[in-house]
Amino acid sequence: MLFPRLLGEYDQNNQLGHYSVYTGKVVPGELATDSGFWDAYRTVYLWLSVAAPDILDRLLEGWVNAYKEAGWLPTWASPGQRGSMVGTMGDVVFGWAIIANKTPHLADDMYAAIRKDAFVERPKNSQFGREGLSAYSDRGYIPVKSNVSEVVSRGLNFAEADSVIAAAASKLGHYSDASVLYGRAQNALEKSFNTESKLFEPLEASGNWISPFDPSLWSDEFFTEASARQYRFYAPFNVDFLITKYSGREALCEHLENHFSEQVCPVYTSGNFGLLHEETELGLTSEDFGQYGHNNQPSHHVLGIAVAAQCFHVADKYMEKVLTELYTPDGWSGDEDNGEMAAWYMLNSLGFYMIDFAKDELLLFAPLVKGNYTISLLGEKTAVRVENVDLSGGHASSRPYVCEVHWYPLRGNINAAELELDSARSVRGLTRRPEPVDYVVLETRRLARTDFVKGGRLVYFTSASRC
C-alpha cells in the first residue's frame, strides 16, 4: 500500500518498533506516515474500514504514536510533518474512529490529539495546529487581510472537524467540550454563508462581505484550490442548514441540478496563486459537468449532499455519469492525491458513501457494480444483489436500469470485509455494456438503519420499481 504507509518493523526479537522522525529515536510500536489528511479523510479511511480493517487499526495506532512523538497530530506527514494544505482534518479521522468504535483502546489518546487541535493555539513558527484558530473561535470566521490564507475554506474545514470532535466528545462524556465545539461549527456556517448570493464568501474584520466579489475567482486568499462556486454546498455535516438557507429542499435540489449544468464564463478566474492545474482540468469537464469539479477534493461531497437532501434524481443522474465518464481506462479527471480519488470510486461504485462522519451515517444508493456481493458495513456482513443498473434519474437514456437492488444484513461476526463480485459483470464502464433497454421510472425511499443493521441511525436508500 503506497498511501498511507506504515513504518513499523520487527527486530531480531520479533518486537515491533520504528525509527521516530519526530524524536530521532527507535521506539516501540507502529508509525503511520505518507497521508495528507486534507485529501484522505474524505474517503481513504472509510474505504480501509471496509477493505482492510486490520490495516486501519494499525494506521490508527501509528497516527497515535505520531501524535505522542510530535506533540501534535500531523496534518500531512511524509515521513514527518510537512504542514501542507489547510485545516486539521486528521481530527475527522480520529473523531470518526472514536464514534464508530474502531480502536476503543486508543480512544482517549485520539481524543487528546484532536482536542488539542481544537482548543490550543498554534505555536509561533510551527507547522502543527490550526492557523487562524483564535479568530475562528472568537468571530466564527477568519477575516481577510489577517495574514492567514484561504480564509473561507480554512474556516469551513475547522467547522467540519469541530462537528466530528463534538460528537466524539459527547460519546466519551466530555459534554462541555461537545457543546462549545458544536456551537462553533454551526456559528461558522451561519457567519460565512451569504444568503443573497447563496455562497460561502469572505468577510472583512468589520463583518461586512468583501465587495466587489467574483465567485469564479480562484484565489488562495479566500479558497483552497477552488472558487466559491465549488464550495457553495460545503456543509457536509449539516445538510439541514443548506436546506434552510436555500429556502427548502426543492430549491436546494434545483441549485444542485444547476451546479452540474451551469455554464459560467469564465469558468474560472486565476488569482494570485497563478494558473493551477485544477483550474484547467475543470475547464476540460465543465461542458458536461458545469461547476462540479470532480478533478479535485472540494467537490467530492456534492453528490452525497444530493442523496442526504433527498435530491435523488440529481444523485442518481450524475453519480453514474461521474463514475463512467470521469474514470476511464484512458485516465481520470484529476490527480490521485493520497489514494483519495480511487477510494471515492470504489466506495461509490459499490453504492455507499459518507459525508457526515459525526453521525457515522452511510448514504446508500444503487451501485455501479452488477451481480451479487457481500461486504462489511457498519460492523455487519451485508449482502447486496444488483441487476441491470441505471442511475439516469428519470431521464431517458440508453443506459440499462435497475431491476432490483437489495441491501440486507447477514447476521454473524466477520473479521474482514469480503467481496464476492461476479467477474464476468464487474464494473460497468470498464467492460462491455448491455444492450439498451426501455426506461423505467425510479422510486426512492428512506430506510431506517434498524431495518438494515443494528442501531438507530438513518441511512438513505434508492431503488427501482420491479421490472
Image (cartoon, rainbow, N blue to C red):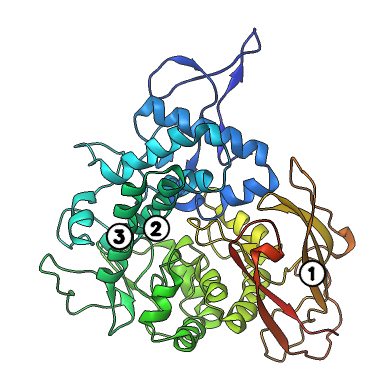
Which image quadrant for residue 199? bottom left
Q: Are marks 3 and 2 in contact (CB under 8 Å)?
A: no
In percent of width and height, residue 201 lies at 27, 72
Q: Separation of disc 3 and disc 2 at Cα?
A: 12 Å
Mark sitting earlier along the chain (1/2): 2
Q: Earlier in the sequence, mark 3 or mark 2?
A: 2
Rendered image: mark on residue 406: 1
Mark closer to the chain start, 1 or 3: 3
The residue tagged 2 is: 160
Work out which residue is located at the far left of the displayed protein and give it.
206
* Quarter of the figure with the N terminus: top right
Q: Find disc 3 in the rendering and name its residue.
A: 183
| Extreme residue toward the top, this view | 13
Query: Which residue type does callout 1 highlight?
Result: His
Is 373 located above or below residue 434 in the figure? above
Residue 434 in the figure: left or right of residue 165? right
Q: Nearer the viewer, residue 291 or 180?
A: 180
Q: Residue at x 45, y 72 (%)?
A: 239
> Mark 1, mark 3: which one is toward the viewer?
3
Q: Amino acid at mark 3?
A: Gly
Q: Secondary structure at mark 2?
A: helix
* Whole-number angstrom distance, CA of label 1 to CA of label 3: 39 Å
Instruction: Using the image, determine if residue 202 lies above or below residue 171.
Output: below
Dot 3 surroundings within 10 Å: few (below 14), some, or many (20 or more)?
some
> Callout 1: helix, strand or loop?
strand
